[in-house]
Image: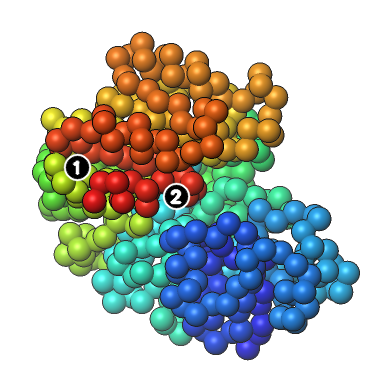
Amino acid sequence: MSSFYFLGIGGTAMASVAVALSHAGHAVTGSDTQLYPPMSTYLDDHNIRYFTGFSEKNLKGASPDALIVGNAISRGNPELEYALDHHIELISMPDLVRRHLIGENTSVVVAGTHGKTTTTSLVAWLLEDGGLKPGFLVGGIPENFSIGCRASGRSEEGFFVTEGDEYDTAFFDKRSKFLLYRPDIAIINNIEFDHADIFDSLEDIKRSFRLFVNLIPRSGTLFVNGDDPVAVAVAAGAFCNVERFGLSAESEWSARNIVVDGEASTFDLVYHGSCLGSISVPLFGHYNILNTLAAIAAATRTGLPFDAIARALPRFKRPKRRMEIVGTYPRNITLIEDFAHHPTAIRVTLEALGQLYAGRRIITCFEPRSNTTTRNIFQQELAECFGPASVVVMGKVHRPERYLPDKSLNTTRLKEELEQQGKSVFLAGQGSANYPADIVEFLQPQQREGDVVVLLSNGSFGGLKNLLIESLG
């Protein structure tokens, strides 16, 4: 067994892989800054020792066989500099997954701008419930497993399901992560512009997805969102079998007669024009119907019969921070947390919540935190994606010093445009050191019976969730 030190262990995938390798018998430790739940709790629950803050003393004391370098780590990090000086082997997290977890398993890779975590969790659950004991790596904590990564439970003819991120791999390897996962069965949910810190344009992103498609062997299968013209165009160059999933009749896999209630979405599953039967899944919104179709198609390709898939889906549990109901409080106020941070993800999440909680007022708290939404790239799109929300709270722009004013998201302008739509808008942290408590102070007199309060962020939002739980309880 080997000794691994995870530099940047607090990242969702990094922490999950660290725990999986620890369970496999490897010695694991690591370090990071700003660790927060759920990943800090996850590491603690699995007895992974880690250092808060970076110091070469940490690495010197650990004396690992290899340093696993997270993609947020760059030159100048004291532990990285120590490793380079002392010739410690550097391995990227995706390469570690390829070597030690995917191995010779049949590799199922879920890619796309949106929906990766939910779809990967769905595929892993379907295979698990079908007795295939898959290994998996999910960019979150899937509730059916309570762990984000594990090795395959089969010594032969096993499966490994990976959330295939298009973000870059490490400071020394600028390829998209999914290019290291050796796909046999692949899903492309959708393709949009994102990650403006590493991609210059949508064409740049499409180029990376084309490379991914080109890795699928001719004996493999690619499932692509037939309702997304960009994804379909990228898939056109595949050497393998390609099947589409979507809500249009042209797709090989489609959903008809969709019915939604407070518990689940139900639809008829149609394959090549023939109805295979009825499906019920505790997910909401058309985008989650697409995620479900993709997962069903991939699970069928592994050999699972329709009946097994139909039995498993009603018992699927959403990953954490994916329309996660944090709690219901006095006056029937519901608090929900979601990872949405791209305008499209915000729009479809709020549309799904508007459908699920029809007749109830939606209060949306959004933190502009990603490298794309902190810039003005999506200035107009952000003004158009909060449709179902009556009240919008705009958190502080994360690390605004990175960009000149003419390149940054203009939250004042965004507030004006949202107010023109009739929404009540609050810009948090404006000249106040009381952030994000000022959000709670704003919301308390605003709240009404039956409100749905939604937190949207790909970070911690400064601990806003816990502050709201205290104030609502």
Quarter of the image for the N terminus: give it: bottom right
Compared to residue 322, the image places residue 1 above or below, namely: below
Q: Taking the image as drawn, is residue 254 in sight?
A: no
**Mark 1 closeness class: few <14, some 14–19, many ≥20 residues within 10 Å:** many
Choose between 246 and 176: the one closer to the eye. Answer: 176
Q: Is residue 397 shown left or right of residue 320?
A: right
Q: Is residue 108 above or below residue 27?
A: above
Mark 2: secondary structure: helix
Taking the view exactly as shown, the residue that stands out farthest to the top is: 420
SS at badge 1: strand
Residue 164 horizontal/vertical position (percent): 51, 54
Which residue shows up at 52% across the image and 84% down it? 24
At 77% across and 74% down in the image, what residue appears? 57
Q: Position of residue 88 (x, y in %)?
A: 80, 74
Ranked by sequence position, the earlier of labels 2 and 1 is 1
Rendered location of residue 66, percent (x, y):
72, 76
**Amino acid residing under circle 1:** Ile
Instruction: Give the x, y percent position of residue 236.
Output: 50, 39
Residue named by callout 2? 463
Q: In this figure, which residue is indicated by the disc labeled 1?
A: 333
- The answer, for residue 264, to whether it is visible in the render is yes
Report the front residue among 169 and 473: 473
Residue 139's place in the image compared with 129, above or below, is above
* Marks 2 and 1 in Cβ contact (< 8 Å): no
* Label 2 crowd bin: few (<14), some (14–19), many (20+), radius 10 Å: some
Towards the viewer: 110 or 224: 110
Q: Is residue 336 left or right of residue 257?
A: right
> From the viewer's perspective, is 50 left or right of 37?
right
Amino acid type, mark 2: Gly
